[in-house]
Amino acid sequence: MSSKSRKKVLLMGKSGSGKTSMRAIIFKSQLAADTRRLSATIDVESSQIKFLGGLRLDLWDCGAFMDSHLTAQSSTVFRSVHSLIYIFDAESPDLLSSDTHYFLKCLAALRDQNPPSSSSDEGGPTVFVLLHKMDLVPLEMQQGKLVEFEADVGRRAREAGWKGGLQFYGTSIWNETLYKAWSMVISHLMPSLSSLRTHLSHFLSLSSASEIVLFERTTFLVISSVTAPLREGQEGSPEWDERRFERISTMVKAFKLGCSKIRAPFTSLTLTTPHYTAVLDALTPETYILVVGRGEIQPAAIELNIRLARPHFAKLEAIGNGKAAATAAA
């Protein structure tokens, strides 16, 4: 399979940082409360996850033997990596000492095993840094802690010779911040994301919608979203929460799990208020779409637009899969 359709992603961090729990929540639809029963990952657990038909995610959950990963297994673990997700425990007493030391060693191994190539059309591996278990930090201190952590770790990484970018997120398994961070990871892995946004924008315009959000069907991570510009004379909408997409992911995922427990299949959701109408429905075999329109727009009109759009987006998905297969065969 082509490297463009198959992405190797490392999930790393010291033992107890929360790697296995977040993997179970995102990819196995477990509730946060159920992750207490999970045992720690000892060595390396590799799993292949299918996204949007043509994309294969090779996720390597690297367990407690950090020294082994950095020495005897270094070439196996760090070679041909597309992205590294490194997890820090926000309440670790060694956060800015030994925890950061191991992170810097992982960056060095990542750099050594993935030297830049002038013939490659991609940059080096992308690194996502998750300051996890932020629910244990007092709410009023969370933003300051993340900013201070990002500045300190970013500075030390540059001093150690890391020239690539670092993307920092504060996360917790108990709220939508986990979905926000992982949605950014998955969006980064997707090819032709700008093209997909163009088609979504066209659909938004044709359907007179206010906002459209596209979700991956299994994980319900946000793939892309488009929002209509304000019309002339229209005031902004301060009631919209900037984390609304990820909160929808969290709630729908929990609702789907509840449906499965009573063997009631989840198909779609419709919500109407005086201010807006929202319809969540399947778009393609790999995606769900949320279309939000003004309150006067009837749900049946949105449902019809989604039904009419399905063949177009299914064709786009098939074209992407065909290109991936052709590249792999070549």
Image (cartoon, rainbow, N blue to C red):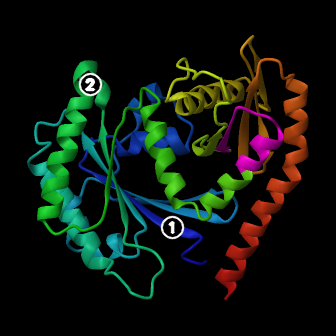
| In this rendering, position of residue 222 left or right of residue 140 | right
Going 34% across and 81% down the picture, which residue do you hit? 116
Going 51% across and 45% down the picture, which residue do you hit? 183
| In this rendering, position of residue 302 left or right of residue 241 | right
Residue 149: quadrant of the picture: top left
User: Please, is residue 242 above or below residue 325 in the view?
Assistant: above
Percent position (x, y) of residue 249? 58, 33
Front residue (pair 62, 298): 298
Front residue (pair 179, 212): 212
Residue on which the image places disc 1: 7
Secondary structure of the residue carrying numbered label 1: strand
User: Please, is residue 83 above or below residue 259 in the view?
Assistant: below
Going 75% across and 10% down the picture, which residue do you hit? 274
Q: Which residues are magenta?
A: 200-216
Going 17% across and 64% down the picture, which residue do you hit? 105
Residue on which the image places disc 2: 136
Q: Quadrant of the N terminus?
A: bottom right
Q: Is residue 214 magenta?
A: yes
User: Please, is residue 197 above or below residue 136 in the view?
Assistant: below
Q: Quadrant of the C terminus?
A: bottom right
Residue 144: quadrant of the picture: top left
Is label 1 in contact with label 2 (beta carbons under 8 Å)? no
Percent position (x, y) of residue 194? 61, 59
| In this rendering, position of residue 73 left or right of residue 234 | left
